């Protein structure tokens, strides 16, 4: 706990200010840790907090600890996202020297004797990944025969690939596939099916690839696949459960793109957006053996009571016990198809969390890294995270303030019949906002590292502080209705609008070019 004596190691002016701040904090029943060196920005926040006193509900942009906490949370989040930029991640994983392509620390691919190299990339990070691969090959004097890159609509602007005559860049729909997703998959299949036993195919895979690479099996239309995707996104199932079904109604997912690449050799570079980094789940595992089965799909249908909600063609494909069932199954791990393949995860959520932790430490916080395995319902996780902050503030457990608690993962949402706007990160923040109501010196940020948080709006998440709930109540905003209708985006937008404070609560930095799930940052002073 901060006391005047605890500041004795600071220079005289700082010691006096810290002592005064500590006395004011003690008067209001607040505690703060003061390091044995000047804390700079963090020390200023502590002094602001002490001056503000309890119960201050000024506007979100008002000078003081709340605004500064938001800014620090944003800075920590930004550092995490910067650490997993795809271009740098791929450059760090590849090296070409004397005709040998090194992939990671151990794998090597001899290019002598390789007749042609094909490059295919799909996902939200596909542009940066493909640019890096081409740079490495260019520097080694190796040309690519053909390249096909599929990214999310709106993310191809300004890329350096379009100037290459042998590289095709396509934009497609996400999170729901569209006709452009089918065209992108067709172009990739055309390129890979042309590969021979003397060729090498380099595949860059990142989050979002499951929607962007879309080729439904015969008998299932794009409209029926879209309906199925939307149903899975809103039923509350996990990404693993969702992808199990999507793999079994696709011609490219679940190792089936690797079938198209055969007999060429395959190198896969992966930017993970799935908890635990399971290769067969990331972008629905197009180049690796599939661990899910048709029976797993049927279990998902039963678990979420989808029997009468799935399109008839999808239901028939998954649930029928026809004699051709073996032909519907995906290739499995251990199949000789994958025997000589090289696969490397170049970036993941754990790297983003680690970078965010380093930034928080540089700002003067103690830190706790809770890992990258956060899953579950977004609303419930938000309440749980708020509970951790309460324990920190009231009991100093699991750490005394000032502390930054950082973790990552991907939560889910169960949507009502007519949902509003806002994804899992805003839902988490909205839930946490009520749970930390009235607490001083706390903030919770939840944001998508790809710069998005659901369709039809521009926010990646939100950062809330203790006074926000009371502010919303005073302004007459309908919190319960926003929770019930999954309309977190409009709730936060109204909160900002009434204070003429755009992008104060919302994270609105636009597409980041990467995707390693979500980051959750909790700060306590």
Image (cartoon, rainbow, N blue to C red):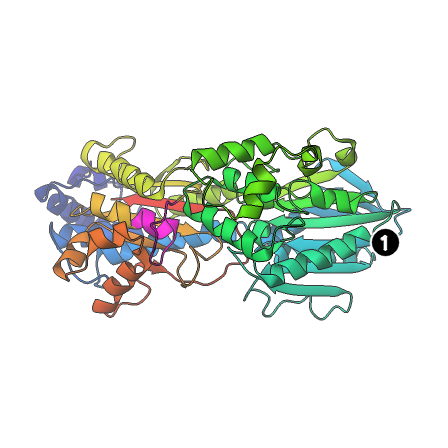
Compared to 358, does 186 lie above or below?
below
Using the image as rendered, state which of residue 222 and residue 79 is in the foreground: 222
Chief secondary structure of the magenta portion:
loop
Choose top left, top right, bottom left or bottom right for residue 63: bottom left
Residue 420 belongs to magenta span: yes
- Image quadrant holding the C terminus, namely top left
Q: Which residues are magenta?
A: 413-429
Could one spot residue 518 in this view of the protein?
yes
Residue 86 in the figure: left or right of residue 473: right
Name the residue that disc number 1 marks: 116
- Furthest residue toward right: 113
User: Where residue 428 sits: x, y (%)?
Assistant: 33, 46
Compared to 181, does 373 lie above or below?
above
Compared to 40, does 255 lie above or below?
above
Choose top left, top right, bottom left or bottom right for residue 138: bottom right
Residue 210 belongs to magenta span: no
Query: What residue appears at the point 14 percent right and 48 percent down from the top-left corner?
Result: 20
User: Where residue 480 sits: x, y (%)?
Assistant: 21, 51
Residue 192 in the figure: left or right of residue 250: right
**Which secondary structure lies at badge 1?**
strand
Choose top left, top right, bottom left or bottom right for residue 67: bottom left
User: Where residue 518 sits: x, y (%)?
Assistant: 44, 47
- Furthest residue toward top: 334
Q: Residues within 10 Å of mark 1 (few under 14, many from 20)?
A: some
User: Where residue 472 sits: x, y (%)?
Assistant: 18, 58
- Image quadrant holding the N terminus, namely top left
Query: What residue appears at the point 11 percent right and 49 percent down from the top-left corner?
Result: 54
Compared to 157, does 358 lie above or below?
above
Query: What residue appears at the point 75 percent right and 31 percent down from the top-left corner?
Result: 335
């Amino acid at each position: 706990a901060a006391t005047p004596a605890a500041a004795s190691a600071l220079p005289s002016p700082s010691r006096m200010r810290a002592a005064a701040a500590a006395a004011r904090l003690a008067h209001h029943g607040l505690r703060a840790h003061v390091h044995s060196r000047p804390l700079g920005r963090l020390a200023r926040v502590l002094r602001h907090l002490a001056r503000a006193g309890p119960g201050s509900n000024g506007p979100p942009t008002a000078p003081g600890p709340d605004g500064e906490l938001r800014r620090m949370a944003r800075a920590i989040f930004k550092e995490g996202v910067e650490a997993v930029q795809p271009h740098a991640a791929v450059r760090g994983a590849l090296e070409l020297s004397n005709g040998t392509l090194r992939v990671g620390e151990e794998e090597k691919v001899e290019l002598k004797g390789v007749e042609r190299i094909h490059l295919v990339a799909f996902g939200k990070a596909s542009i940066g990944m493909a640019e890096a691969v081409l740079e490495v090959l260019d520097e080694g004097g190796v040309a690519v025969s053909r390249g096909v890159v599929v990214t999310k609509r709106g993310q191809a602007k300004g890329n350096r690939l379009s100037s290459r005559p042998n590289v095709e860049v396509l934009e497609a729909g996400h999170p729901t596939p569209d006709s452009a997703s089918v065209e992108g998959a067709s172009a990739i299949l055309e390129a890979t099916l042309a590969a021979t036993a003397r060729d090498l195919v380099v595949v860059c895979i990142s989050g979002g690839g499951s929607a962007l690479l879309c080729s439904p099996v015969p008998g299932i239309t794009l409209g029926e696949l879209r309906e199925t995707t939307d149903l899975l996104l809103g039923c509350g199932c996990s990404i693993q459960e969702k992808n199990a079904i999507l793999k079994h109604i696709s011609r490219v997912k679940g190792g089936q793109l690797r079938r198209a690449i055969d007999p060429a050799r395959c190198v896969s570079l992966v930017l993970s957006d799935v908890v635990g980094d399971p290769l067969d789940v990331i972008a629905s595992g197009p180049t690796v053996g599939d661990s899910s089965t048709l029976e797993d799909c049927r279990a998902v249908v039963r678990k979420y009571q989808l029997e009468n909600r799935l399109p008839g063609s999808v239901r028939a494909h998954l649930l029928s016990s026809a004699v051709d069932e073996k032909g519907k199954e995906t290739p499995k791990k251990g199949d000789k198809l994958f025997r000589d393949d090289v696969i490397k995860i170049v970036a993941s959520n754990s790297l983003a969390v680690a970078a965010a932790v380093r930034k928080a430490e540089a700002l003067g916080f103690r830190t706790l890294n809770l890992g990258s395995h956060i899953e579950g319902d977004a609303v419930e996780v938000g309440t749980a995270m708020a509970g951790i902050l309460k324990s920190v503030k009231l009991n100093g457990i699991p750490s005394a303030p000032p502390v930054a608690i950082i973790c990552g993962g991907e939560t889910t949402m169960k949507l009502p019949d007519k949902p509003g706007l806002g994804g899992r990160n805003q839902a988490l923040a909205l839930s946490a906002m009520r749970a930390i109501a009235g607490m001083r010196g706390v903030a919770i940020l939840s944001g998508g590292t790809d710069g998005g948080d659901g369709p039809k709006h521009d926010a990646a998440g939100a950062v809330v502080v203790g006074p926000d709930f009371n502010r919303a109540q005073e302004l007459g905003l309908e919190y319960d209705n926003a929770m019930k209708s999954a309309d977190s985006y409009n709730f936060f937008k109204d909160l900002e609008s009434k204070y003429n404070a755009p992008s104060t609560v919302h994270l609105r930095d636009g597409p980041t070019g990467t995707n390693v799930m979500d980051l959750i940052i909790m700060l306590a002073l």
